[in-house]
Amino acid sequence: MLSIARAELIQIFRNRLVLVTSLIMPAAVSALFIRQHETWAEMASLGYIAALVTFTVGAFGLYTTIVTTLASRRQNLFLKRLRSTAESDTGIIAGLVAPVALLSLIQVAVILVVLGAVTGAPGNVPLLALTVLSMIAMLIALALATAGLTNSPEHAQVTTLPVSLGVIGVASWVGISGMEELAAVKRLLPGGSATELLVQAWNGGIGLGESVALMVPTLAWVGLSVALATRMFRWEPRR
C-alpha cells in the first residue's frame, strides 16, 4: 500500500490539471472567502465560511480528484495490473486514495488555521476536527461509488458534477438559511448535518448529545456509499 501511495503522490505533483483542480482552485476560492470574511459573516456567520471552504476543498480537491484518478487508472489497465500483485483490493484502493485524502486534510487544516488567525479561534476545536474527518470519510465513500459509474477521466467531468455541486449547494443553503425551516430535510441531504456541525463547532454553543445526533446522517451516507461502491466498482474497463 505504501509503495502505491508514494507513486500516486508523485503522479499528483506531475499532473498539472490535477494540481489546479485539487490544490490551486480550492485554495484560491478559500482565500477569496477569507479575504471577504466580514461580508460573509454579516450574511450568515463565520461558521458558514469555515463550512463552505471545507466543502470546497472536499468537493473539488478530494472527491473529484479521487473519481478522476480511479477512472484514469482503470482506463490504462493500471488497476488490473495492481490486482496481479500480492496487495489486497483494500490495500490498492487505500494506496490510491490516501495521498489525495492527506493533501486535502492538510489543505483544510491550513485554511482553517488561517481563518482562525484572521477572525478568531473556533469555539470547539475537537468537534470541528471530528466533523471534518467525518466529511472527508463521506466524500471518499461517495467518490468510490461514483467511480463505479465513470468510464474515463473525461467522463468524470460529468459524473462528479451532481455530488460536487450538490454538497456545496447544500452547505450554502444550510449555512445561509439556518435550521429554522426544513431542518429534517437539510440534515438528511449529503453534507447537511456536517455543515450544521461545522457552523456550530466554529461559532460555539452545541452540546455533546446534539453533536452526536448530528453525526449520524453523515455516517449513514458513508455506509450507503460504501455499499454502493462494493456493488458498482469495476477493476477493468467496460468492453
Image (cartoon, rainbow, N blue to C red):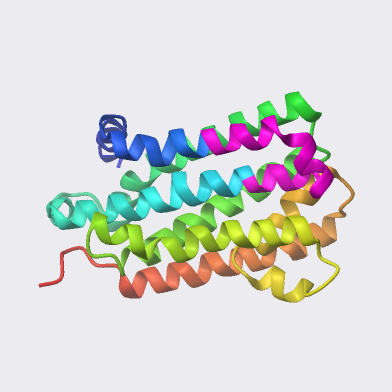
What residue occupies the far top of the structure in this picture? 117
- Residue drawn where x is 31% and y is 67% of the image: 148
* Position of residue 195 measured from the top left corner of the image (x, y, whole percent): 69, 55
Q: Is residue 83 above or below residue 185?
A: above
Closer to us: 84 or 217: 217
**Which quarter of the picture shows residue 150?**
bottom left
The reply to whether residue 2 is visible in this rendering is no
Quick check: is 167 in the magenta stretch? no
Q: Is residue 67 visible?
A: yes
Q: Which quadrant would the N terminus be assigned to in this image?
A: top left
- Is 32 left or right of 184, judged from the image as shown? left
Residue at position x 36%, y 35% from top? Answer: 19
Across and down, in percent, residue 28 comes to 53, 33
The correct choice, above or below, for 213 with respect to 126 in the image is below
Segment tinted magenta in the rendering: 28-52
Q: In this view of the protein, which residue sits in the foreground, 183 or 135? A: 183
Question: Is residue 35 one of those drawn in magenta?
Answer: yes
Image height of 63 relative to 220, above or below:
above
Which residue is nearer to you in this view: 42 or 83?
Answer: 42
Instruction: Give me the residue at 22% from left, 52% from top.
Output: 72
Q: Main secondary structure of the magenta part?
A: helix
Name the quarter where the C terminus is drawn: bottom left
x%, y% of residue 40? 75, 43
Question: In the image, what residue occupies the spot 70% across and 31% down?
Answer: 115
The image shows residue 113 at horizontal and vertical percentages of: 67, 28
Total residue callouts: 0
- Tell me: 215 left or right of 76: right
